[in-house]
Image: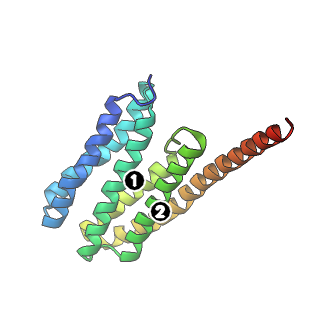
Amino acid sequence: MHRWAWTVSNSLSLVRLVLGVPLAWAIVQEATFWVIALGLVAFVSDVLDGALARQQRSVTELGKILDPVADKFVAGVAALLLVLQQKLPVWFAVLVVGRDVLLLLGGWLAWRWGGSVLPALPPGKWTAMAIAGTLFAAYLRWEDWLAVGIALSIVGMLSSSGVYFRRWWQLFRERRTAASAVRSGAQSR
């Protein structure tokens, strides 16, 4: 399969990305039915896109970019709107959005250093699910579940960030070793 081919799973990720706009509208309008319906469609598309890509052996570089960008866009927009509605603590939204920005920057660096896009890992997917659940609890003002969701999200963000940092550090070391070998080879000529 071509590394940048368009696939069914990429289409699902694109649908999730586009759903961020009507979901934002539904949150602003406090249209609970639509928040739940669009949120569930986004969640199901997130679960299905990766499963389909692996099942059909159609994992692409485009999909490895599109999937996390869609996740981060939907979660970031929802978190910021929920802060504006005073349903979600500001510090939690800053933590979610800040981590997502760092992950996107790290993914870009990994691509620049290694030439390919790093795939999402299970801890990152579990964290995305915990954050999604937390955002639902915040929107619905389920205070007890919000506290549990925030705790689970923080644990997930810390653990998945550690996993991603370890991957970036390994790529950085490989890049540095390769550059050192090139310099040594150039000096020996």
Q: Quadrant of the C terminus?
A: top right
**Would residue 185 be found to the left or right of residue 144 on screen?**
right
Tell me which label, 2 or 1, sits earlier in the chain: 2
Label disc, if present, on residue 129 of the rendered structure = 1
Pick whichever, 31 or 112, lies toward us.
112
The number of numbered badges drawn on the structure is 2
**Horizontal and vertical percent for residue 141?**
26, 71
**Would residue 188 be found to the left or right of residue 21 on screen?**
right
Pick whichever, 4 or 27, lies toward us.
4
**Horizontal and vertical percent for residue 72?**
37, 55
Give me the residue at 21% from left, 54% from top: 21
**Horizontal and vertical percent for residue 160?**
54, 55
> Which kind of residue does numbered mark 1 sit on?
Met
Q: Quadrant of the N terminus?
A: top left
Give me the residue at 57% from left, 52% from top: 164
Q: Which residue is mark 2?
A: 99
Query: From what the image shows, is residue 150 above or below residue 121?
Result: below
**SS under mark 2:** helix
Q: Is residue 52 visible?
A: yes
